[in-house]
Amino acid sequence: MNSPPHFICTPFSLMACQGLASGETLKSLKAESETLRKKLEEERKKLHDVELEKVAEKAEALGELNMKTRRTLKGHGNKVLCMDWCKDKRRIVSSSQDGKVIVWDAFTTNKEHAVTMPTTWVMACAYAPSGCAIACGGLDNKCSVYPLSLDKDENLAAKKKSVAMHTNYLSGCTFTNSDMQILTSSGDGTSALWDVESGQLLQSFHGHSADVLTLDLAPSETGNTFVSGGSDKKANVWDLRSGQNVQSFDTHDSDINCVKYYPSGDAFASASDDSTCRLFDLRADREVSIYSKDSIMFGAASVDFSLSGRLLFAGYNDYTINVWDVLKGTRVAILFGHENRVSSLRVSPDGTAFCSGSWDNTLRVRQEGRGVGRELKQGGTTLYG
Amino acid sequence: GASFGTGMERVIVAMQDPDMGMKMRNQRLLITVIPHAMTGNDVIEWLIQKYNITEEEARHLGGLLVQYGYIYPLREPRSLLLRSDDSPYRFQTPYFWTSSRWPATELDYAIYLAKKNIRKQGELVDYEKENYSILHKRINHTWDFVVMQAREQLRASKQRRKADRIVLECQEQAYWLINKPCVNMPLYYHYTTLGRNRVKSSICLESFMKYSEQYLHHDPIMSGCLPSNPWISDDTSHWTINTDMVGIPTRLRVERWSFSFMELLNDSMGRREFMIYLEKEFSAENLCFWVACEDLRHGESSKIILKVEEVYKNFLAPGAARWVNIDSKTMERTLEGIKRPHRFIMDDAQMHIYFLMKKYSYPRYLKSELYKNMLAKAIVPQETKKSVFPFMRRQRHSSPSPAMVTQATEDDGKAKGAGPTGTSSTTNSQI
């Protein structure tokens, strides 16, 4: 038999799946791919009947935002690379270039636990939903879980458990809905789901053509998807069960450093080295907003939404944090204070504040000074923080 | 799922029946003896006998079995034909059955090609060479992993007996002949993407407007919080009045349960209240079932089989104490799937029950006296007035670590919820 063997495929994909049949060249397939791509864009455009800014015209304008630093967490000896909140709304875990991982009660600024990893550049850390453990990793290509012991004398490193193993650096990690599973992203171009107890690989996700830099779990009813962003400028949405790439967005012009779901789960925001943040709607299957300004020339490293999804906080490589009106697309505030790149940014679980970690070795917890509970400013000096 | 697949599987199972199935014997392949094999002739003869069909029909059926990978040839493995002579054939292991396997991934295929390439230069045929270079380009950053896996698998196979090794190689080769993934993924992806349902922009964007508006007063950064924001006032009351175990919830919190079914279930107090309501309606088993399924999905791999058994015993078995009412199709599929349990086996049933509760019980709950009373007695905290001497700082009280509290009330295997929030036990206050 000279012709390729018969395939079991759905009618749609039958044409596409025959591999290189005689007469076909890589060139002709590339051409077909381009035609389809254009057709896809046409289809998407047909349903795009209005812009977000137009719809948002009737939304109330936001007044001036007055966010102040309320806590400064000092203790890391080198760049802070990542941070995560505990579900108790006040504790934080942060990781640093020098290999140290610290658990803070950010409210009191007390350090509660400290771990020294056997590696530098701990690029990812996460708090377990129960508050009883943390996960972290980086240049060691692994993600390890440390149960948080209350015995001050106990060495946390003794109970360390290696869970994930990649073939390149760990860029991101998060627990899923329980302490028993971890989702990781890696410089090896893959993401993966792991069983914490056994270290077993449950599912791996292939599709990025370069480093995967970030991921976020969807807050949906059925809880089965997550989004990842990579150095290939793509944001991909994945089905946790099948490992399939179900949606892809490729409008960014450079690496995507951070992705975060909108609170309803119907959209997600991204931060990129192309100095823009963008909003992608999953049902419309397209980008619906770009948050950018000519004066912002440096890459955006991290984003998160306020509780209602109205505000988007973004940390940049030019040491600033820009706050965007998600609906109107305008910038409502620019926050200074850090003395080096902002690497990581998260709103607290109940939305009462947000925390930023920076290459200036510190973390700052910030809160809006207006609305209920506003404090007086005495002669221009800030009283707290 | 392919119904023709399960039909063929039935034939294969019958063929391997110890009493009425095919007579297997050793078959010679060059100088190696392969056990448990049969000839093409044997297959056709058996089919004629078993199904009382003509030779033509038996050839056709037998040919399908080879084409779909349930039987594979030992000689000339690339030629997926059933020859009516003494050519040797073997049954493919169920692991490789087309109908039961996950879709073959590019990575698996890359490892297979790398293995062939390492094992013997020039062993890859033309289209395999093309696929190899496409894959090498596309997943180049993972190539170290591919080569490592290929070398590992080759090393492991060297330790097998020659007969086993040949069999396994043939099995694998047959599998990949039939199931090799669409290496030109973009095309496949684009075709499926074209078929997807999309929603108009205007509808999507309106929903963002509605969501922000609905949650505006719940967003502390936009609207502040009562009695005060802990980060500003150093007073943790806002957290203490919103804990899981608090006697009377705040009004905002109870209101939020009405925003969506997910909001109600995500709040442990909301979930408790809903359970009380369902008990009154004699449909509490639905929520119990949902909770058990969540526990299965997010729990340890080692506990899956046990948990599936428990769920079956408590909720699905005929006469079960808390039998849940699922439609017959879903029930049939679930019961079938339980034979090979995995963590997602209850997904269909769980989703069915979830949407049942969402559509019927949830709206009724919101209209019920139970909910209305809760809303009526919910507290609205007083706003803390600015203190007269704002430069006198309050003590910042620490709180018990979640690790400590949860250890005291250990619940094995359960998805753990949020720990306690700031209580005012003063151990050390930090300035």
Image (tube, coloured by chain):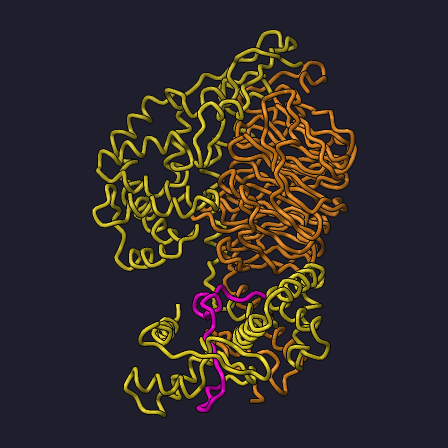
Chain colours: A orange, B yellow
Pick the front one: B36 or A162 = B36
Pick the front one: A200 or A57 = A200
Q: What's drawn in magenta, residue-wise?
A: B81-106
- The picture quadrant where one finds residue A253 is bottom right
Task: Estimate the x, y position of residue B109 in percent, counting from the top left.
Answer: 60, 68
Q: Is residue B116 above or below residue B43?
A: above
Please tell me whether residue A170 belongs to the stretch shown in magenta.
no
Q: Is residue A83 above or below residue B405?
A: below
Taking the image as shown, residue A383 lies to the left or right of residue A55, namely right
Pick the front one: A174 or B240 = A174
The residue lying at 74 percent from left, 47 percent from top is A294
Pick the front one: A35 or B239 = B239
The residue lying at 28 percent from left, 36 percent from top is B365
| Residue A125 shows up from this direction | yes
Where does the N terminus of chain B fall, quadrant-wise? bottom left
SS assignment for the magenta stretch, majority: loop
Where does the C terminus of chain B fall, quadrant-wise? top right
The residue lying at 58 percent from left, 43 percent from top is A326
Task: Estimate the x, y position of residue A179 in percent, counting from the top left.
Answer: 52, 38
Task: Estimate the x, y position of residue B90 in percent, counting from the top left.
Answer: 47, 77
